Amino acid sequence: MSKYQQYTKEFKLEAVRLLEHGDQSVTELALRLGIRRNLLYKWQAQLRGKGDAAFGGPGRRPASEDSEVACLKRELARVTEERDMLKKAAAYFAKNLG
């Protein structure tokens, strides 16, 4: 994983659109999107300078998607551990009752 978070082209375009046409302040928008405020200005300048050629490359998922994946992985690990404990308990009781 690189040191810096990367975002998809669509995410950047939508962020700039919200910056230019939204009702929120830059600070509120940045907090809502989970990014630094200066990134919004940087993306806006790139879009103005390069137009459609701005934001080349596939990028990564937004942080909100990454955190959802991490949350789901933790939940899966917890449920797997519970399942394994229940299997052991069922085997123990079956052995002692039979």
Image: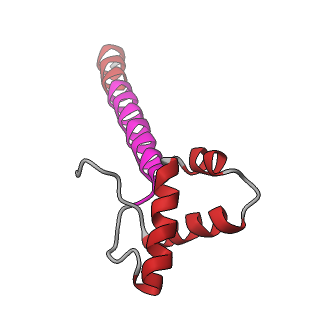
Taking 33 as reference, is 61 left or right? Answer: left
Give coordinates of residue 20: x percent, y percent: 66, 67
Give the number of callouts.
0
Using the image as rendered, state which of residue 10 and residue 71 is in the foreground: 10
Instruction: Tell me the quarter of the picture where residue 9 sits.
Output: bottom left
In the figure, is residue 71 to the left or right of 13?
A: left
Q: Give the range drawn in magenta.
A: 61-87
Query: Residue 55: image x %, image y %?
Result: 39, 74
**17 with respect to 62 (left or right):** right
Residue drawn at x 29%, y 19% as measured from the top left:
95
Furthest toward the top, the residue is 96
Residue occupying image coordinates x 56% and y 51%: 33
Question: Residue 13: within the magenta?
Answer: no
User: Looking at the image, is 60 positioned above or below residue 24?
Assistant: below
Q: Residue at x 47, y 84 (%)?
A: 51
Q: Residue at x 44, y 72 (%)?
A: 46
Work out which residue is located at the far right of the displayed protein and give it.
23
| Rendering coords of residue 11 (x, y %) | 50, 66
Please tell me in which quadrant of the rendered image residue 93 appears.
Answer: top left
Tell me which corner region of the image, top left, top right, bottom left or bottom right, holds residue 97. top left
- Magenta stretch secondary structure, dominant: helix
| Residue 70: in magenta span | yes
Q: In this view, does 9 lie above or below 96?
A: below
Location of the C terminus by quadrant is top left
Q: Position of residue 38 (x, y in %)?
A: 48, 51
Coloring applied to the structure: secondary structure
Above or below, 3 against 9 in this view is above
